[in-house]
Image (cartoon, grey):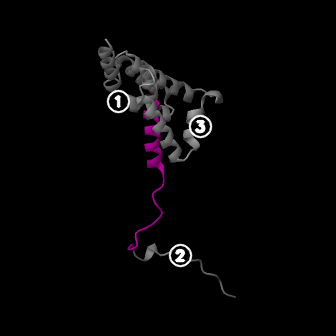
Amino acid sequence: MSVRKTRQKDADRESPTIPKLEVNKFLQQVEGRAWTDAEKELDNIRQKSDGGQWSRGYVKALEGLLLTFRGNDDKYIYLPRIVGISAPEVVAELKSEFAQFSMSDIHGDYDRGFFKALEDYLSLVSTSKQSSLPQSTEKPLDQGPEAQPVTPQRDEE
């Protein structure tokens, strides 16, 4: 009996039927504050999920993200506030913690799905933050005369 239970746990963890494309669209719409579109994607995700504990936890986390961003109550915006003001290293550390939680056998299937959704959210945030950062200010050495710094000239009296 324990072998079957272990197989079920592994099946829930390894092959949940959560549509990744819809999840990415949902997370982008939440970030973009497109609530109606995000709700439609969330409904699609609910319909396509398999209804297992892992999937239920995943979907609940997505619902929580939607409610957190949509509401104006500061009481529930810890994660978005931390992500918004923190350095990329802090976001990466949070993502790593959520990844560990989502893989740990200490947590139940529901919790692992929940943490996996948060990890996916932080993956999207970290990639969008990296793409929105300005490119390096260093210029290649062989750019010609316009690459030389301009020094202001003073009027001599």
Three-letter code, disc 2 = Val
Instruction: Where is residue 92? Give x, y as percent.
Output: 48, 43
In terms of sequence position, does the residue under pointer 1 or pointer 2 come before the other? 1
Q: Relative to residue 68, is residue 146 depicted above or below?
A: below
Which sits in the foreground, 39 or 73?
A: 73
* Residue furthest to the right: 157
Asked if marks 2 and 3 touch (Cβ < 8 Å), the reply is: no
In terms of sequence position, does the residue under pointer 2 or pointer 3 come before the other? 3
* Residue furthest to the top: 1
* Range of magenta residues: 117-143
Q: Is 89 in the magenta?
A: no
Q: Nearer the viewer, mark 1 or mark 2?
A: 1
Residue of label 3:
81
Label ID, residue 58? none
Label ID, residue 20? 1
Asked if marks 3 and 1 touch (Cβ < 8 Å), the reply is: no
Which sits in the foreground, 133 or 149?
A: 133
State the residue at coordinates (48%, 36%). Answer: 97
In terms of sequence position, does the residue under pointer 3 or pointer 1 come before the other? 1
Which sits in the foreground, 104 or 65?
A: 104
Disc 1 secondary structure class: helix
Residue of label 2:
150
Image quarter hosting the N terminus: top left
Instruction: Where is residue 157? Give x, y as percent.
Output: 70, 88
Disc 2 secondary structure class: loop
Which sits in the foreground, 111 or 140?
A: 111
How far apart in space, not on screen, are marks 3 and 1 (Cα)? 25 Å
Q: What is the crowding at mark 3: few (fewer than 14 residues within 10 Å), some, or many (at least 20)?
A: few
Q: In which quarter of the image is residue 117?
A: top left
State the residue at coordinates (39%, 33%). Answer: 24
Three-letter code, disc 3 = Arg
Q: Is residue 78 left or right of residue 105?
A: right
